[in-house]
Image (cartoon, coloured by chain):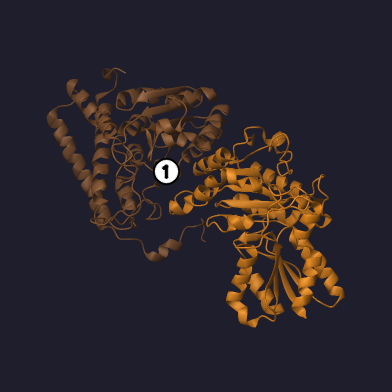
Chain colours: A orange, B brown
Amino acid sequence: MGRKLPMYKAISEAISQEMEKNNNIFVMGEDTGIYGGIFGATTGLLEKFGAERIKDTPISESAFIGSALGAAAKGMRPIVELMFVDFFGVGMDQLYNHIAKVHYMSDGGVKMPVVIMTAIGGGYGDAAQHSQCLYSLFAHTPGLKIVIPSNSYDAKGLMISAIRDDNPVMYFFHKALMGLGWITPLEEAIKEVPEETYIIPLGKAKIVKEGNDVTVVAVAKMVYEALWAAKELEKEGINVEVIDLRTLVPLDKETVINSTKKTGRILVVDEDYKSYGMSGEIITSITEHIGDNLKSLPKRLTYPDIPIPYSRALEKFALPDKDKIIKIVKDMVK
Amino acid sequence: MAIGEIPRETLLLMYRTMLKIRTYEETLGKIYFEGKTPAFDIAASPIPGELHLSSGQESAAVGTCIHLRPDDVVVGTHRAHHFAIAKGVDFKKMTAEIFGKETGLSRGKGGHMHLFDTNVNFSCSGIVGASFPQAIGAGIAAKMTKKDYIGVAVGGDGAVNQGTFHESLNLASLWKLPVIFIIENNHWAISVAKDKSTAVADISERAKAYGIPGVSVDGQDVLAVYEVTEKAIERARKGEGPSLIEIKVSRLRGHFEGDAQLYRSEEDLKLAKEKDPVPKFEKLLLEKEIITEKEIESIKKIIEEEVKEAVKFARKSSYPKPEEALVNVFEGGN
């Protein structure tokens, strides 16, 4: 039975249902216990599973991310929350030098079924150290799977896949999509979510709107900016196809290639920084295959290569949005 | 501890293991320079890259691991051969790994700083301070699954000023985890003397700050190490929480092979040699008539043969197929 759930509840439900089935799953992180996670992702879990399986940690990211590795090597399946992705620096060594590499360095001897979930995204005046996306940085590191849900239905299915995966999975949830009381919720992200468990396989993008003129590729909140843009463009007879990648690693190139072959035009919209990131990667992957067959130059609309400014006026200027997408798409089809 | 309280078999095993480590390290130290003279090229020789040998530190590994079971977890450092051998890591496979061969522990993907043997729960890392959280992760797993194995974190004196050390001591104490922290203080973090980096005289003093027992022990005396670690391991196994043990050892060789050690005085080098734990233990065993000169000769021969066999195995083994480089980034395929 489906019922409408905000993303934070879909995530905590996914964790809860998997924890019921497997005693080796446990949660660690700052404020994951009585608070239920600063972004609600562990809501209600402490009451249900107790403090042994839902651990509130000290503010010691290296210690709890690194100990997730140690526990996973002994057969546990830890889920850790790194509150804001912006805080990765204080635990990064354990993540990129160890969790990501241990399976390879041991030639498959040591499995790393760890989920690291963390909040991304800006647009609400939280400035340079609490608003970043940074998923490209982790996607760049071999050995980490990268999941970025855009709505509550996907969030549950992707979380269950992440938990069941024997590899380290980084699960990025966008704050504005979580359906929290303290950030204006995006109604479109609150979907019907089945009560039973289901999986959405990692590495399967979703065409969220079909169209023939331009392919727009996005993740997380940018999926909605693209959809809003597509809606307005439709009034002018421009049909945009919007693809929600859902995961960056594995990357569903096939869906993007097929769509771009159909439309002949590709625009990547990304809330992460511009250089050396997702937008460049997608465009390169596509042009390597069908570069000669494009009707217009590939385009990208991203967060510029600047730290995220605080002032509302400055941040709005920098963030990719519907209006900027419309302008670029119109140029592309001219 | 009175030597009479320890079974002769145990004493002989400790002696043999110390000797095996020393013979191994000195042998690798020679092989390392094959192809590296007259001009030193770090990429040349059957053993390329950095090589950190543990001669002088045998007592720390042997005095600790003698109390451990295969299911206990040891997480070592960049200088970890002694702990690997004492923990019972497959000797031939370990050697082949150091030679980068397909018969190695990780079929050549790990190398000397990244040895993994899941059969005896051993791993190590090239990043200073990385072992602490990983070992406490094993402690978390033991506690949650109600098993009585323990986690052993090994670090050098250079690692105790890393955040991971402090975060992990606190977390292990807070959660009363079955863990011991072994600090091998060889007085040198590459070229920086311990007194130039660390504000306390004895590193074990830091245990006070985290509410756990802390002991410093003379690493020249393997039986003293034996006694201290026995107590700490028992304590951890009984669920009474972690301990910090500082073992004051000698670094008989450079930080890495090829290190001219211009930063060390003649006196310091002389003192290190005087504090060598191997001849001291040998002398004690002879004095107490636990072993005869003749037995020592025969043990030495057997060990030399064992080391020779392992090196022969490694030399004769093939390199992995180049394409294997692409395999095992992820469990279940890339």
Asked where in the image residue A304 lies, by quadrant, the reply is bottom right
* Side (left or right) of A97 relative to A211: left
State the count of labels: 1
Q: Decide: is A123 above or below B270.
A: below
Q: The residue marked by circle 1 belongs to what chain?
A: B
- Residue depicted at x 61% and y 75%: A287
Q: Decide: is B296 above or below A154.
A: above
**Residue B295's x, y, as percent?**
15, 31
Residue farthest to the left, as pictured: B294
**Residue A207's x, y, as percent?**
72, 68
Read off the residue under disc 1: B124
**Residue A293's x, y, as percent?**
64, 82
> What's under tag 1, amino acid-wise?
Cys
- Residue depicted at x 50% and y 37%: B162
* Side (left or right) of A55 relative to B119: right
Q: What secondary structure is marked by label 1?
A: strand
The quadrant the C terminus of chain A occupies is bottom right
Q: Decide: is A255 above or below A58.
A: below
* Side (left or right) of B281 relative to B236: left
Q: Quick check: can you spot residue B63?
A: yes
* Side (left or right) of B209 relative to A33: left
Circle 1 packing at 10 Å, graded few (<14), some (14-19), many (20+), is many
**Residue B110's x, y, as percent?**
40, 52
- Residue depicted at x 49% and y 52%: A101
